[in-house]
Amino acid sequence: KQEVTQIPAALSVPEGENLVLNCSFTDSAIYNLQWFRQDPGKGLTSLLLIQSSQREQTSGRLNASLDKSSGRSTLYIAASQPGDSATYLCAVKGSNSGYALNFGKGTSLLVTP
Amino acid sequence: DVKVTQSSRYLVKRTGEKVFLECVQDMDHENMFWYRQDPGLGLRLIYFSYDVKMKEKGDIPEGYSVSREKKERFSLILESASTNQTSMYLCASSPNNGATYNEQFFGPGTRLTVL
């Protein structure tokens, strides 16, 4: 069964720093990988989707990379802001798991002014 | 923008009650999903549907059933609510084609408390 791990579980940085969130997965036979943001008590907002044939995707200050062979993805956030404070979740859609996404437990990010 | 809506943000029910959670999406997506999210356990898939009247069990289907009579609507049913079903319930949808192929879009969630 696909296992998705996110490190660190929590992160606190001062405003303006660039930061990297990590996601690893055990089965490299994936269809795509998706990064989400979740604010407390709210639903998930899709940030970036990387198809298995892609190496990275960018949206504004966010850049996500994918190394399928090593089972890793990173989410890079440039020039962090207090409004970036949230939990970031990584989810993998396996080639052999039908329609389901396997989620990591998330990284809780706090950006302090 | 894709919009996924859920019928309630907060719900309080009694043990043994039958509970309906409704989800509606407006983007003509083929696939719809129900997850629950619990601290320390993350998101777990309960059921999903890839077409009208079609459904597949996820990782934790026990105690739940689903209904999809129309493409835009996917209902989660707790036949007899129990306290261990207190959780955040999240609905999602995804398309089978197009620029956002297989990208899942989530609703705002329903926080269910069973007393």
Image (cartoon, helix red, strand yellow):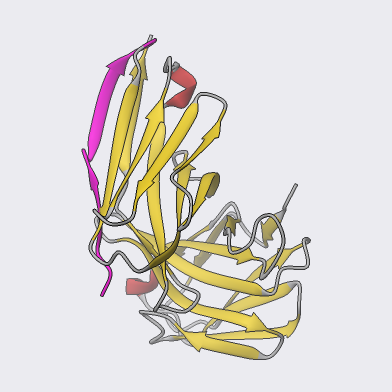
Please name the residue shown 72% across and 66% down the image: B24
Asked whether A68 or A25 is in front, the reply is A68
Residue A3, horizontal then vertical, whole percent? 24, 64
Specify whether residue B77 is in view. yes
Query: Which quarter of the rendering shows the C terminus of chain B?
Result: bottom left
Please name the residue shown 43% across and 20% down the image: A78
Q: Is B34 part of what is drawn in magenta?
A: no
Give the magenta range: A1-16
Q: Is residue A111 left or right of residue A24?
A: right
Q: Is residue A48 left or right of residue A105?
A: right
Asked whether A49 or B65 is in front, the reply is A49
Residue B30, horizontal then vertical, whole percent? 69, 74
Please name the residue shown 68% across and 91% down the image: B53
- Tell me which corner region of the image, top left, top right, bottom left or bottom right, holds residue B58: bottom left
Residue A98, horizontal then vertical, whole percent? 47, 79
Specify whether residue B115 is in view. no
Residue A99, horizontal then vertical, whole percent? 50, 75
Q: Is residue A33 above or below residue A30?
A: above
Please name the residue shown 55% across and 45% down the image: A45
